[in-house]
Amino acid sequence: MRFITVLILVFLLASCSGKSSIEKEIEKIPMDVEIFRFDKEFASASINDLPMLKKKYPAFFPKQFHDSIWVGRMQDTLQQQLFDAVAKEFPDESYLEDQLIPLFQHMEYYFPEFVPPAVVTVTSDVDYQNKVIVADTLLVLGLDTYLGDDHEFYHGIKRYAAKNLKPSQLAPDVASAYARQLISQPRKRDFLAQIIFFGKELYLKDVWLPESSEADRIGYTEEEMQWAIENEEDMWRYFIENELLYSTDPKLLGRFVNPAPFSKFYLEIDNESPGMVGRFIGWQIVRSYMENNDVTVPQLMIKSTEEIFQNSKYKPTR
């Protein structure tokens, strides 16, 4: 009996830890990622190296700016502190490769036309509004926006924004940047169209980033994610009872869709809630749609709001 019990446990452990056939197939996709550490090269460069850097990275040296701008940046002590902080957090390219290679493999699996970009890392004076920039075959990463949510450079930034300035947010941010190039813009401006647009983006993160946490995919803390899960039914009821789904009131974006310290139901629960709960609800609608319909991931990108909502069979329950 004990032998049989051990066999059952071994089987269960193997089943839990085993990867799906799709994931095993994705792992086999050859993927080379070329990473250029412009941040490191600029930090260690002298004034005499400036012509070489300008030749190698012309996109980062606009012609309208005089060389004195770059010389001043090289000699600025605050910039040097920023360079040092990035070098400490990302001393080599191993973490970047660990994040980007699996992401690009998943992107190529679901979208075979995907061509992996050349990756260039920079410092951006902590421009957390533009952490990731995708341009044709180039991916630019502002590594000074991923130093850790409690880093001293972020103390003047509002907490709801600073909480996502951490290394684990890098791959989700890159996924978002590419997702928005693939998703058809909604034809209508109503609230439902907006939240389903972001629901598509988050669903892409589901399939592209299976190893990341759900909280990281949407940009929540674990506590915020748990609040959204526990209050999903109540939030949905609020949207329905207040006839918000087909409203085109632009204020709804600020209340429930855009990044914010909390969502604005104008109820006592506001201070407990995370921002962007509309995106969370849109995510659950899209997930329900994909569970109940035979649709490929590329097909999802062009499905209309009406098609997704009407055929999602979405009905949250406690």
Image (cartoon, grey):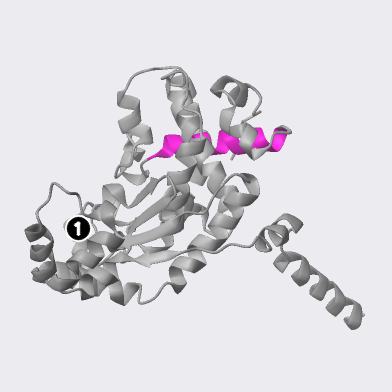
Q: Judge the density around disc 1: few (<14), some (14-19), many (≥20) Cα neighbours within 10 Å.
A: some
Helix, strand or loop status at disc 1: loop
| In-image side of 287 versus 254 (left or right) | right
Which of 274 and 100 lies nearest the eye of the viewer? 100
| In-image side of 28 versus 48 (left or right) | right
Seen at 72% across and 55% down, the residue is 22
* Magenta region: 276-292
Seen at 30% across and 32% down, the residue is 254
Q: What x and y, as percent, mark residue 188?
A: 45, 18
Seen at 29% across and 45% down, the residue is 261
Residue 46: in sight, yes or no?
Answer: yes
Prevailing secondary structure of the magenta residues = helix
Which of 14 and 208 lies nearest the eye of the viewer? 208
Q: What x and y, as percent, mark residue 148?
A: 32, 66
Relative height, residue 78 to residue 266 (above, below): below
Of the 4 image quadrants, the one containing the C terminus is top right
Q: Is residue 65 part of the magenta span, yes or no?
A: no
Q: Is residue 290 part of the magenta span, yes or no?
A: yes
Disc 1 marks a residue whose amino acid type is: Asp
- Quadrant assignment, res 20: bottom right
Disc 1 target residue:
125
Relative height, residue 142 to residue 198 (above, below): below
Q: What x and y, as percent, mark residue 176?
A: 45, 46
| In-image side of 228 versus 82 (left or right) | right
Q: What x and y, as percent, mark residue 222?
A: 45, 57
Of the 4 image quadrants, the one containing the N terminus is bottom right
